[in-house]
Image: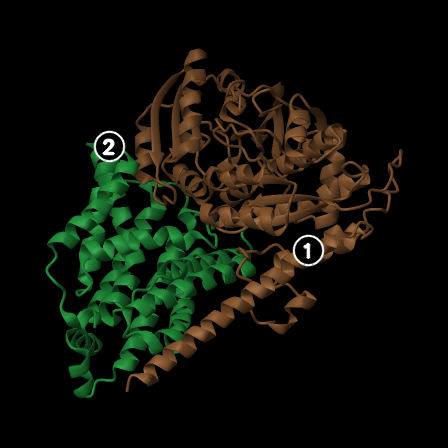
């Protein structure tokens, strides 16, 4: 009687074990294949890129995996972004409009990993970053690559989830063997993924705007920090509107709290007053009671640090409660085009937003970049914005530092990063001694038709950060 | 006085939103014992119906019945294709509906893109009543929710269908052996549950963002209401929504929004501590 269930269990165990073994084999085969391809010195980077990127986005159609075509890859994190066909363009084809033709990069590619949110709540910011990855390869390769080698990008999606982000980082470092990781994702993902970069001694440039305070021997943080977004802009805002009494309304997590802590200092230094500070949980849909509190506070300026759907819910409901932008001007530090577009110009007209980049930045370099972006990806492409722009800048900073160092060794590149200055579509940027980025800060005002117009810019704003990782 | 009136109106509008969002969850849970983790996605799809109606230049109010019809059909399809096969095993329904919620989110993303969309308020501005200005749309929302909830409750308590439903809730096996076709009733219940979620989505669409992830934010609130109100009687949903809305509004008024959320979750824990064991018929 006992032998039957026993043998059944055993055969099931065997089935599971053999499945696991098969998966491990497939994974190993894929890994080997990649290592081999990149070891071949004369391999044109284009073919490699195309293959690697395809395996990034869909089930890998590599020859080794044909014995188990239906097997899902266990290492695969949630992926979406389709690879762009243009990446197959050979990097050793010099750009025709380049006046000075640098030597075409050859040899084993330098591998640039990009850790970003392409799904989950922050997934809306993903598509422009995926597009920009294409420009990163093109532009760095057109300029001669890194130390004569072409570059290749690898995208990994954190699904706006720190645990997935850690796996994605693992995949970039161990699976794709990247030389550097550029990140645009939440601070929670950064905290989860950072130890992996530290253990593997891989340079990690976090390019998203964040609350500040990060300091690690393998990290540089090139996004806007609150001190940059706020120190020059808060006094300017009070001068522009004549408002003195601020209401601070944010989602309840570290970035709004840190922003408000600093905002309070700058407001008081400028002779203003904080008449209310409220936090709402992420995912709040009903703002009626909060609107009541704001209306009763006597505020004449609102600083909303709300993200995504919460921002849209607050602003659309605020209008009906009589505390819209018309009644109480807004200074926002994260309202970007997607969110503003969903609110609609009737709600947003007149709002001011402070960020390190808008696609409206008026410089020859940026105008050319933006028109190239929309030509390539279509007029209705997800707009290039501060997150994608900072990823692009981070890649250029890395390329410049690695070229200056003459190697991709992490410590050498990190040393070359410090004090590095560049002019990019964002403007003039410089890595500071605190491993952050001195960068321009722009204030955009939303126009009656919903478009953004830059009404004020502050060049080379220094971050109020300290960092000494050694 | 005015501040109190306004806060009362805020509480009533929050009550209406919570009630309509949770109603379908309560129906499906109470009657079928199915823990529907895709309920938030039904609300999200209802909001997208409102978005499509708006994008085609049609009147927003049309989206309320339309969302009900679309979601009813979808609910029926899902019941036949998925729920019917597993509804007697609550743990399986949790897994299956969780998977369903992921699928629905991704499908919405494929069809409508990840971008935030919005539905403009069909009646912007405020109306003066009781000596205070209060958003007109919220008055209308409260009225529509009152009608929908009342009709649903009446249908489940006063009609022959309601009698059958209560017989099934009391004892499914006995009801079946008495000749009641529980399969048909389940089908109706799941369809109606999805339809009310669709109505909820269409109604809340002008108050916030329409996006594939929107449902995630509605699910916890709906569960809170069902837990607090109890799920073996349908009016429990209304009672739960009332209590949660009162706690939320009160705590935000006197303290802040973060504590309001903590308070309503603590309320759920408290209620579960003191709730007597539910009759087996509700879940088994």
For mark 2, give the secondary structure.
Answer: loop
Query: In the displayed structure, would residue B193 be above or below residue A429?
Result: below
Chain name for mark 1: A
Query: Which quadrant is the N terminus of chain B positioned in?
Result: top left
Residue A102: mark: none
Query: Which quadrant is the C terminus of chain B positioned in?
Result: bottom left
Mark 1 neighbour class, 10 Å CA radius: few under 14, some 14 to 19, many 20 or more:
some
Q: Colour of chain B?
A: green
- The residue positioned 61% from the left and 71% from the top of the image is A69
Query: In the displayed structure, would residue A138 be above or below residue A327?
Result: below
- The residue positioned 32% from the left and 25% from the top of the image is A297
Q: Nearer the viewer, mark 2 or mark 1?
A: 1
For mark 1, give the secondary structure.
Answer: helix
Residue at the outermost front position: A3
Circle 2 residue? B255
Task: Tell which of B279 and B17 is nearer to you.
Answer: B279
Disc 2 from disc 1: Cα separation: 57 Å
Chain coloured brown in this rendering: A
Mark 2 neighbour class, 10 Å CA radius: few under 14, some 14 to 19, many 20 or more:
few
Residue B69 picture location, percent across and down? 40, 69
- The residue positioned 16% from the left and 54% from the top of the image is B272
Q: Would residue A267 appear left or right of A136 to someone viewing this image?
A: left
Residue B268 picture location, percent across and down? 20, 50
Task: Tell which of A390 and A382 is nearer to you.
Answer: A390
Residue A34: mark: 1
Query: In the displayed structure, would residue B115 be above or below residue A73?
Result: above
Chain name for mark 2: B
Residue A186 picture location, percent across and down? 49, 40
* Mark 2 on the same chain as mark 1: no
Q: Would residue B14 appear left or right of A76 to someone viewing this image?
A: left
């Amino acid at each position: 009687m006992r032998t039957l269930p026993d043998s059944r269990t055993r055969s099931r165990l065997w089935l599971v074990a053999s499945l696991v073994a098969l998966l491990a084999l497939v994974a190993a085969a894929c890994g080997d294949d990649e290592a081999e391809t990149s070891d071949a010195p004369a391999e044109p980077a284009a073919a490699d890129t195309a293959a690697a990127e395809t395996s990034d986005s869909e089930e890998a159609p590599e020859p080794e995996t044909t014995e188990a075509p239906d097997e899902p890859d266990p290492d695969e994190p949630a992926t979406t972004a389709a690879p762009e066909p243009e990446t197959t363009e050979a990097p050793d084809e010099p750009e025709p409009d380049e006046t000075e033709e640098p030597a075409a990069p050859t040899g084993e590619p330098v591998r640039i990993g990009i850790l970003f949110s392409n799904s989950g709540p922050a997934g809306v910011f993903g598509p422009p970053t995926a597009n920009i990855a294409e420009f990163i390869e093109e532009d760095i390769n057109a300029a001669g690559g890194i130390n004569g080698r072409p570059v290749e990008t690898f995208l990994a999606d954190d699904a706006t989830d720190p645990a997935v982000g850690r796996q994605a980082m693992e995949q970039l470092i161990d699976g794709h063997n990247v030389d550097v990781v550029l990140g645009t994702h939440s601070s929670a993902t950064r905290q989860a993924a950072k130890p992996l970069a530290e253990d593997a001694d891989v340079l990690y440039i976090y390019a998203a705007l964040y609350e500040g305070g990060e300091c690690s021997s393998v990290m540089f943080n090139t996004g806007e920090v609150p001190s940059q977004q706020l120190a020059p802009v808060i006094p300017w805002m009070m001068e522009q509107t004549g408002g003195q009494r601020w209401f601070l309304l944010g989602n309840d997590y570290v970035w709004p709290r840190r922003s408000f802590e600093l905002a309070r200092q700058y407001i008081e230094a400028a002779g203003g007053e904080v008449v209310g500070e409220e936090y709402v949980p992420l995912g709040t849909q009903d703002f009626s009671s909060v609107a009541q509190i704001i209306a009763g506070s006597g505020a004449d300026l609102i600083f909303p640090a709300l993200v995504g759907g919460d921002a849209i819910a607050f602003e659309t409901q605020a209008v009906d409660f009589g505390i819209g932008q018309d009644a109480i001007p807004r200074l926002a530090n994260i309202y970007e085009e997607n969110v503003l577009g969903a609110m609609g110009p009737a709600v947003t007209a007149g709002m001011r937003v402070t960020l390190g980049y808008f696609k409206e930045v008026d410089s020859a370099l940026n105008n050319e970049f933006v028109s190239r972006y929309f030509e390539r990806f279509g007029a209705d492409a997800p707009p290039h914005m501060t997150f994608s722009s900072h990823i692009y800048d981070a890649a250029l900073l890395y390329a410049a530092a690695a070229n200056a160092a003459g190697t991709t060794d992490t410590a050498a590149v990190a040393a070359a990063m410090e004090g590095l200055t560049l002019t990019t579509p964002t403007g003039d940027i410089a890595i500071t001694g605190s491993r952050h980025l001195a960068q321009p800060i722009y204030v955009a005002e939303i126009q009656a038709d919903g478009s953004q117009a830059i009404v004020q810019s502050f060049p080379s704003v220094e971050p109020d950060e300290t960092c000494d990782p050694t | 006085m005015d501040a109190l009136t306004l806060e009362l109106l805020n509480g009533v509008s929050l009550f209406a939103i919570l009630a309509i969002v949770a109603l379908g969850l309560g129906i499906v849970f109470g009657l079928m014992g199915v823990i529907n983790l895709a309920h938030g996605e039904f609300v999200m799809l209802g909001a997208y119906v409102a978005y499509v109606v708006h994008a085609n230049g049609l009147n927003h109010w049309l989206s309320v019945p339309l969302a009900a019809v679309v979601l009813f059909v979808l609910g029926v399809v899902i019941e036949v294709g998925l729920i019917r096969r597993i509804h007697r095993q609550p743990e399986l329904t949790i897994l299956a509906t969780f998977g369903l919620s992921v699928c629905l989110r991704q499908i919405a993303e494929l069809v409508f893109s990840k971008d935030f969309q919005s539905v403009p308020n069909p009646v912007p501005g405020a109306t003066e009543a009781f000596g205070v200005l209060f958003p007109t749309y919220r008055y209308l929302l409260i009225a529509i929710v009152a009608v929908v909830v009342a009709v649903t409750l009446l249908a489940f308590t006063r009609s022959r269908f309601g009698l059958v439903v209560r017989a099934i809730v009391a004892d499914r096996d006995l009801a079946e052996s008495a000749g009641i076709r529980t399969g048909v009733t389940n089908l109706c219940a799941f369809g109606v549950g999805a339809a009310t979620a669709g109505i909820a989505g269409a109604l809340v669409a002008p108050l916030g963002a329409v996006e594939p992830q929107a449902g995630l934010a509605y699910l916890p609130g709906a569960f809170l209401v069902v837990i607090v109100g109890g799920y073996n009687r349908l009016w429990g949903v209304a009672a739960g929504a009332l209590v949660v809305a009162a706690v939320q509004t009160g705590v935000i008024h006197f303290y802040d929004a973060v504590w309001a959320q903590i308070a309503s979750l603590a309320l759920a824990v408290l209620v579960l501590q003191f709730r007597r064991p539910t009759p087996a018929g509700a879940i088994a």
